[in-house]
Amino acid sequence: MMKRMIGLLSIAGMISTASAQQDSQYTQYIFNGIHINPAYAGYKGDIYVQSFYRSQWAGIKGAPKTFSVAADGAFYDDKVGLGLIVSNDQLGAQTYLTAYANYAYHIKTGYSGTGQLSFGIAAGMVQMGLDGTKLEGYKPGDELIPVGSQTSTVPDARFGIYYANESFFLGLSMTNMLAQYLAKRNTEDSRIPVPQPHLYFSAGALFPFSEDVKFKPVILFKDDTKGPSAMDITTFLLLKDRLWIGAFARTSFDLYKKDYQQKGLAKEHAMGGILEIFATENIRIGYSYDYSLNKLRNYNYGSHELSAGFYINRRTTAERRQLRCNRF
């Protein structure tokens, strides 16, 4: 019981429940960039449907859990990408439901047309909730604890730019662009966390060792206005255009001085492995495991993430296998 209580205190130190909600954490974002960048919609060419489930800090009551479903495809000679994402987060008494429609415009670049520059925008809604019945105050009648459940729904938008060719990719995007400005704040009646703008920068490259073995290093930088900056560094080996084997390291740090709502937020440090396979020509299945490197590691069994994706064929078999495996 004591360990669980200490673990919960560690969680409380990592988040700011008073006013800010952070974006969902995805270790396998590289398999579908639409989760962090709307410009990725339609990039794979095929119509693609994918789902994620993430259980973070397994073994700790109230730890974050995320489920999402995304679908996207390319239309009008692959010049336009359309997509839809629905995601649900639960963290103790907090809930966070989002739904976005994505639009991307793709421009072929380079002499051979192998490069692609994409601009994307997403519009949708965010429903934030806080269940006061699941919280315990320091004393009876604690004013920081809401009475019953509270919810708030606001419109929101995302924007992104994405460039990729046969050798590398670069992405820049921002999420939660409108929610914090449109959410109604009433400090006496509401304690619902409001999502803050997040900035993402991603980059990666492809190095073929042979026809059967390829190496992919990838980096993701994430920053928001209410918490530490974070960085993921991931490396993959791609075997026979079918199996991905990867390892990653994640760290958070104070890149610059911020006006935190909660001082002394603990930094997140983790490492782990990723495995994804084409179970069939059209089905991708992935699994990743995160192991915390800070004090929280003594109170949980790690973080688990499962993904499953399905392609709806639109290309020949040869084109399909090469594009699906080598595209970022």
Image (cartoon, rainbow, N blue to C red):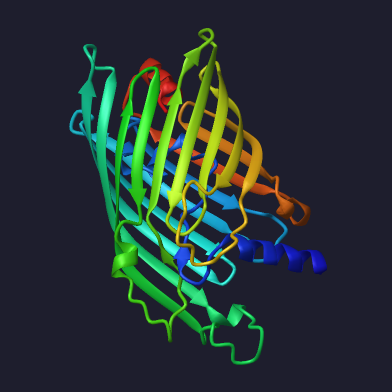
The x, y position of residue 73, in whole percent, is 30, 37
Q: In which quarter of the image is residue 162?
A: top left
Up-down relation of residue 140 to residue 107 (above or below):
below
Asked if residue 228 can be seen in this view, the reply is: yes
The x, y position of residue 276, in whole percent, is 57, 31
Quadrant of image for the C terminus? top left
Q: Is residue 284 shown left or right of residue 160?
A: right
Up-down relation of residue 3 to residue 158 (above or below):
below
Question: Which sits in the foreground, 99 or 118?
Answer: 118
The x, y position of residue 33, in whole percent, is 41, 38
Hey, which residue is sitting farthest right in the picture? 2
The x, y position of residue 210, in whole percent, is 53, 7
Asked if residue 278 can be seen in this view, the reply is: no
Question: Which sits in the foreground, 1 or 74?
Answer: 1
Up-down relation of residue 214 to residue 229 (above or below):
above
Hey, which residue is sitting farthest left in the picture? 76
Q: Quadrant of residue 236?
A: top right
Quadrant of image for the N terminus? bottom right
Q: In which quarter of the image is residue 72?
A: top left
Q: Is residue 21 shown left or right of residue 5?
A: left
Q: Which residue is drawn at 41% across and 62% down?
A: 195
Hey, which residue is sitting farthest front in the picture? 257
Q: Which residue is drawn at 37% across and 17% down?
A: 166
Up-down relation of residue 328 to residue 27 (above or below):
above
Q: Residue at x 45, y 62 (%)?
A: 259
